[in-house]
Image: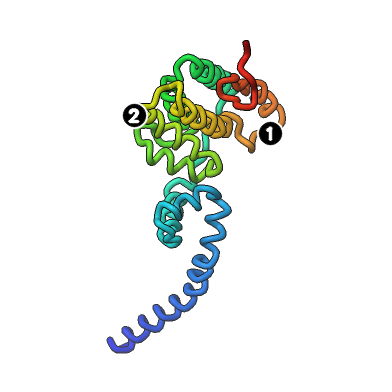
Amino acid sequence: MSTGMIVLTVIVAVVVVGAAALPVLRDRVRRGGPALKRRFGPEYERAVALHDGDTKAAERELTERVERHGDLRERPLDPVGCEQYAARWTAVQEHFVESPRQAVAEADRLLAELAVARGYPDGGRYEEQLAALSVHHADHVDGYRQVHRVARSGARSGVTEAGSGTEEMRRALVGARALFDDLTHPARETGRHRATHAGTRSPTPWALDRGRPKES
């Protein structure tokens, strides 16, 4: 076979393969938005807003998160470990009454440690840990984001703990609780194990529950 024929054969093969792959690629693009919206929920809207409404850029970012962390398999917590984390979270909530800022910082550290225990990246790589959590706990990961932000900022400068700063910290801690529950009570756990964990859910003190009056 002549060199010209070999080149022609290669070109034809490339064209045929490309033509066969094109419908698949188009289908991925077409389904990418709805699939990502379903997977990420509020995180999808947040990503779009951060990219100034550029949906394609937001979807590229979210797709990269899935590619990096989609195969992550969470490590289970044994009942004893779950009870220990629940006790520590209860202590954080109770500490909030006397020292909101310190309690929020403790909650931030506890969530980072818990995430590592479940198999997520080390808390020292916060952004990477957050990205991984967003892939598997998209509905509640923003609570961790908020409590981390408040913990790092020490609340807004010049705002006293008795003022709106305390309310901001309270909202952050309440939001973070949802992710804590996700990580300590996985929905896919079944029967007896879930029932055992259910007993470890820590009550919310009045300071964090706006619907309950302060006890006299």
67 and 210: which is toward the camera? 210
Q: What residue type is labelled 2?
A: Ser
Label 1 and label 2: CA atoms lie apart by 46 Å
The residue carrying pointer 1 sits among few (fewer than 14), some (14 to 19) or many (20 or more) residues within 10 Å by Cα, namely: few
What number of labels is visible?
2
Can you see residue 132?
Answer: yes
- Quadrant where the C terminus is found in the figure: top right
Q: What residue type is labelled 1?
A: Thr
10 and 149: which is toward the camera? 149
**Outermost residue to the right:** 191
Q: Position of residue 91 (x, y in %)?
A: 52, 16
* Residue behind mark 1: 190
**Outermost residue to the top:** 216
Mark earlier in primary sequence (1, 2): 2
181 and 189: which is toward the camera? 181
Can you see residue 117?
Answer: no
Q: Position of residue 23 (x, y in %)?
A: 51, 74
In terms of secondary structure, where does tag 1 sit? loop
Name the residue at 51% across, 27% down.
170
* Residue behind mark 2: 157
Q: CB of mark 1 within 8 Å of CB of mark 2?
A: no
Name above or below for residue 176 compared with residue 25. Answer: above
